[in-house]
Every structure is written in structure tokens, then in C-alpha cells.
Amino acid sequence: MNIKIGMDAKRIVRNASGLGSYGRNLVNALTGSSDCPEIVLYAPDEGQADLRSQVHASGRLRFAYSGKHWRLAQDLWRGKGIVADLQRDGIDLYHGLTGELPQGIRRSGIKTVVTIHDLIFLRHPEYYHRLDVMLYRRKFYRTLREADRIIAISECTKRDILYYSDYPADRIDVIYQNCSGDFRRTAGDGERAAVRRRYALPDHYILNVGTIEERKNVMLAVKALPQLPRREHLVIVGRKTAYTNEVMEYAAHHGVDDRIVWLHGVPNADLPALYQMADVFVYPSRYEGFGVPVIEAAQSGLPVVAATGSCLEEAGGPDNSYVDPDDSDAMADALNRLLADDDERRRVAQLGSEYVRRFEGNRVAEQMLEEYRRVMER
């Protein structure tokens, strides 16, 4: 593909998960394609070396950073000043990977694509500070004015864009997030034993992975725990917030705190074994743009019980289970059905594993390259 593409790489070099993972996985998929364009990754600074190293080296790829005179105003560079750098470097198309485009880029003549992950700040503003909602709203509507085309990472996100704006539907395409296949790697017996010892894991557990915050709604799994077999524990992996204390208090009050294992700061290298030793994965989040942990669980051979109401059915597929995010009885019933029947658990896990292959490898790269062609031909 004979064009030069610039990409917003701030999250690629700064965020270990979430938006950072999205960017790194996409770039690696593109550079692995035989039709890879020339790519320049623009970041305010070099960020973290270990994250940069996760971007595969390629002769078609380089990093570029803001100049020294921008180092004290990096947000301003990313939001506006970067346009001059893109013009200097002969960029044909700029891809905003995290829902933002720099102001004035449309006037520059550079074609644009932006990936929008979710509109949680509009759908559920109660989870954000009022000033943050105002900032995110302003950036969102400004970006719509600059964008030639939009990539939504789920049908759910596309519906939200159309609901909250008048952006033309025929200029929005759904391209699912490209997920690493790392979780398909089977952890060996020694690795599993070491991880079990390291975190004092019980023999049987239900797993939840994700930031422990109100929107993620892990409380639903805690409320279901008394209805599950006594041998089952709940292992919760994620960054703690103030909401964690609320969940811990509830668990103690209802006598299930001894059946919950809280893990924080688990390195990515330990996650495959943590997933693969679990009985079931539970993800009762009230709202997601995509739901990467659901895909990681399915890749790991786990059946999933998740919540209805956003995109999780898209992520997990039709064979996993989905319940109302406020119905702890339904959550307990879904978990008990899986825990009571090994054959059913294996069947669901196998079907889920096959379903999520659509989010891996070259398929996403091919879709993205076609998107770039469509923009350049417009």
C-alpha cells in the first residue's frame, strides 16, 4: 500500500493495557501484512521502553516525538501542534487511535480516520467527574467535525455514535479490536503451579479481571457467591478503587470475604495461567465498548458469564451466558449450570474459543487496510 500513515501513539507508549494494547496490537497486525503502508507513530515523548518494545520492529515503521519546544505543552501539541509535523513529514492519512483528532487537520488536507472505543461519558456520565464529561464531550464533537471516517470497535459503539450525533451512518464502519493470541498459549504444569503458589490460589475459583470500579459491577458476582458450591472462590484481578471498599464491606457483612481473593499488580505474563486454572470467567460490567477480558477468557478455554446491556454479547458470542447486571439470582443460576456439568462447560468453552478467532491476526489488518483505501479514494 503506497501511502504514508501517521498514528496517534501516546497510549501505545504509555498504557500497558486498554487503549495501549489496542494500538500495539493493531500496529503489529498491520506491519505483519504484506501490504503494510509506511507508518509513523507520533507520541509526545518516548514513554515506557518496555511498551515501545512490544511494537514489532519493521522497516515500514518508525516513531516520531514532539520537539523540545513542545515538551512543556504536550497536550497542546497532540491536540493541535502535531498537524504541522504531519505536513512536514508528508503524511497522507492520520489515524486517531483513541477517539481524538487534532484541531485543524481537516483544513490541512490530510485524510483522517478515528477509532472510537466507547461513549460511556455520554451514556453513563454518573461514572465521571462533571468537568471530565464536559472535556470529553467537547473533544468528541470536535473530532466528528474533523473525521473523514469513523471506526467503531463494536456495533454497540456505532449505535451510540448515531444516537448522540448526526454523523452520517455510511461513514462509520465497525472493525473489531485486534486481540493478541497470547492467551491461546497453554501454560505448562510448572508455570501453573508457580502461579498458584505465588498468589495462594484456591483449587476451584471463578475469575474476574478488570479495574475494580462501580461500572465493572463485580458486586454482582459477590452477591451470587453464597448460592454457589462452597468449594468455589472468587478471584478478582485488577486495580483497586474506592468502590473496592464497598465490595469488601458487603462481602464481610454477608460472610463470604473468606472466599474472595484480591489480586493487584499481576503482570501480563501470569495472566494466561490465572485464566486457564479457573472454572468460569465472570464479567458483569454494566457497560463496555468492547470487553477484551471476555475474549481473553474465551481464548483461554473458559466459559463466560457476562452482563447484558452493552457489547459483551458481541465479544463473547452466542454460546456464552449473559444476565441482567442487577440480577444476582440469574448470575448464580448461570454459574451453577456450568459448574454442575463438566461436559457443558467444555462445550461452551470450545464454541467460545472458536467464535473469538474473528478478533485475531490478519483479519483485522485486512479490514483496516481496506478502510484506509476507502478514505484515500474519497
Image: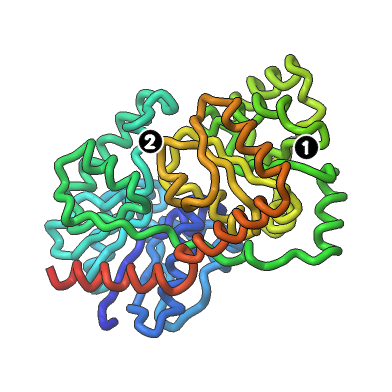
Left or right? Give the position of 128 relative to 141. Answer: right
Q: Residue at x 32, y 32 (%)?
A: 122
Query: Residue 101's spot in the image, x, y percent?
Result: 27, 52
- Tag count in the figure? 2
Residue picked out by circle 1: 232
Q: Nearer the viewer, residue 168 or 316?
A: 316
Query: Residue 160's spot in the image, x, y percent?
Result: 28, 40
Q: Is residue 33 above or below residue 340?
A: below
Residue picked out by circle 2: 120
Instruction: Give the amino acid type for the residue marked by disc 2 in the picture.
Output: Ile
Q: Looking at the image, is mark 2 or mark 1 earlier in the sequence?
A: 2
Instruction: Give the amino acid type for the residue marked by disc 1 in the picture.
Output: Glu
* Quarter the N terminus occupies: bottom left
Q: Secondary structure at mark 1?
A: loop
Q: Is residue 22 above or below residue 373?
A: above
* Quarter the C terminus occupies: bottom left
Q: Nearer the viewer, residue 241 or 85?
A: 241
The image quarter containing residue 261 is top right
Q: Secondary structure at mark 2?
A: helix
Residue 98 visible in the current orientation: yes
Q: Nearer the viewer, residue 330 or 239?
A: 330
